[in-house]
Image: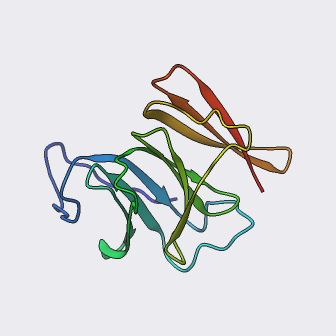
Amino acid sequence: MKAFKIKIGQKTLDIEGHTDSILKIICLDPKRLKTNEQIRDKPKIITCSLDNTIRLWDSKKMDVINVLESPDNSELSCMAFLANSCLVATGHEDGAIRLWNLEISSSVVLKSQKGGNHTNSISCIIADYHKEQEFIIAGSYDGTLSVWEIT
């Protein structure tokens, strides 16, 4: 257990990196995260921003480890972490959902075989793990939910 003294109104540090509004912050602690994949070494922080980047930070030094840019100029709108597979899912303004592998700096867009992809911006996205299977659930301004099984 760690104990901290918090003083009201005391700021420790301003950290710069993104050039636009930050949409989501996710903290990863390898010691507390139960996953099949290994998160290397130290605790990390993942952020996404309207500058169309996802940044992976070393949470001790607060240095940027990796910067990933959305390749299709589709504005990021939300983000979730898939703990079991150590992937990041992002929603975009054009209705796309993208899966990112932060370790190898690559991404893929999820596409439905039956069509029916979202026609408006993804407003929220979550990752869930149920009965040894991982899922992404995304909500859109088009009024629909989509459920994706991640294998």
**Image quarter (top left, top right, bottom left or bottom right) of the C terminus:** bottom right
Q: Is residue 59 left or right of residue 114?
A: left
Instruction: Indicate the quadrant where residue 38 lies.
Output: bottom right
Residue 123 in view of the camera: yes
Residue drawn at point x = 20 percent, y = 51 percent: 20
Q: Nearer the viewer, residue 94 or 53?
A: 94
Instruction: Indicate the quadrant where residue 63 lies.
Output: bottom left
Residue 101 in view of the camera: no
Whole-percent x and y of residue 13?
Answer: 17, 62
Residue drawn at point x = 58 percent, y = 40 percent: 126
Q: Is residue 44 above or below residue 149?
A: below
Q: Nearer the viewer, residue 77 or 17?
A: 77
Residue drawn at point x = 61 percent, y = 27 percent: 145
Whole-percent x and y of residue 86?
Answer: 62, 63
Residue drawn at point x = 73 percent, y = 38 percent: 114
Whole-percent x and y of residue 125?
Answer: 53, 38
Q: Is residue 122 left or right of residue 63?
A: right
